[in-house]
Image (cartoon, rainbow, N blue to C red):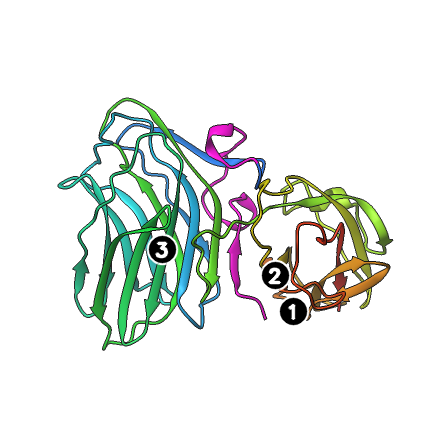
Amino acid sequence: MTHILHLGHQPTDISGISGYLSTVTAGFDATLDVNTLRFTGARSVYAPFRITHASPTGDLWLGFRYVPPSSDAHNIIEASAAFLDFFSASNGLLARVRPLSSTNRYHAEAHGDTTLQGSSSYFATSGQPQWVDVRLAVDTDITIEFFVDGVLQSTATAANTAGKGKPAHLVFGNGGLHGSFSNFTWYYAHIALLDGVSTIGRRFVRRVPNTVATYNELIGSVDALKDGNLASRVASTLPAQRLSFSLSGPTGPAAISAVAGVHLKQIAQAGTDGPQATAGFLRMGGVNHDAVAVTLPIIAPASVYSTWALNPVDNSPWSDLTLPTEAGILSV
């Protein structure tokens, strides 16, 4: 089982961001990825996007890199601005991080039996990259904590005797984040949603398939896995078929204090016949290390994550020197 609920800012599994992917270097950390989500507009622009994810068993943690609008020094906010909204599976609003024009700050709000809003110490610094983290706990109370660069900025708690469920949908309201009628630009990148694991100080390096390696048993080209297009796929007609590949892309920051895990992400779908499950695997030293298989939906593609918290060769902690150079997917 993995604690990963969502990784990445690519359009393949985020609703509403078609056309916003950009390679402008101001918007992302080049040691982690090769692109960003870029938005440009005046104060009246609202371009919400949505991430649907499995409900966590523990607290939900959200982390991402945010570059606020490159507007005036005080980053004046539109009165109806929207930033982050968290919803249950039944679409009940649980919590928000809400920018207020009355304070020009971003405030945490808990939406339980009543709505409670916390004070805030956070002013969005115009055009300056910062790491945002949010912890949302939903139980007999709903508690939301809003951090920027690891520092708690705002928190709120409300009773939840009505029993609102765990979060399952995250909406980036993405509107009214500056108060000028001129056009300004802002960015989001490196989005992570984790179950019960803090995102503070945690970074994810995205590497992608490069060339076919040991196995090439699936129908279709490895190019279909790296083009960012769900319409181009590889397919399997029998169980136990494998496709493996080398990896390309960023290799992470120069100074890495520890490697917490290796994750393989697929976006996959079952067919009307043939294999109904998939698993990721790592190939190291000529040996395959298979993750637990996951049964796939037939109706639509879904994100599937495989996680190795330790090096499967000897169950030792990962280091930047022992990371795998070949990974793959297995039909089950």
Distance of label 1 from label 2 (alpha carbons): 7 Å
Between residues 324 and 191, which one lies in front from this camera angle?
Answer: 324
Q: Residue 322: horizontal and vertical position, in percent?
A: 72, 54
Residue at point 51%, 45% (across, down): 9
Range covered by the magenta-colored residues: 1-30
Circle 1 is placed at which residue position? 294
Helix, strand or loop: magenta stretch: loop
Which mark is first along the chain, 2 or 1?
Answer: 1
Which mark is first along the chain, 2 or 3?
Answer: 3
Residue 85 belongs to the span the image colors magenta: no
Q: Kindly check if marks 1 and 2 are in contact, taking CB atoms under 8 A apart as contact.
A: yes
- Inspect the image, locate mark 3, and give the three-letter code of the amino acid beneath it: Val
Q: Kindly check if marks 3 and 1 are in contact, taking CB atoms under 8 A apart as contact.
A: no
Q: In the rendered image of this protein, does residue 83 appear above or below residue 75?
A: below
Choose top left, top right, bottom left or bottom right for residue 183.
top left
Label 2: few (<14), some (14–19) or many (≥20) C-alpha neighbours in 10 Å = many
Residue 19 belongs to the span the image colors magenta: yes
Q: Residue 304 carries which label?
A: 2
Residue at point 30%, 39% (across, down): 175
Label 1: few (<14), some (14–19) or many (≥20) C-alpha neighbours in 10 Å = some
Q: Residue 255: horizontal and vertical position, in percent?
A: 57, 43
Residue at point 58%, 59% (across, down): 260
Q: Residue 111: horizontal and vertical position, in percent?
A: 23, 63
Between residues 152 and 105, which one lies in front from this camera angle?
Answer: 152
Distance of label 3 from label 1 (alpha carbons): 28 Å
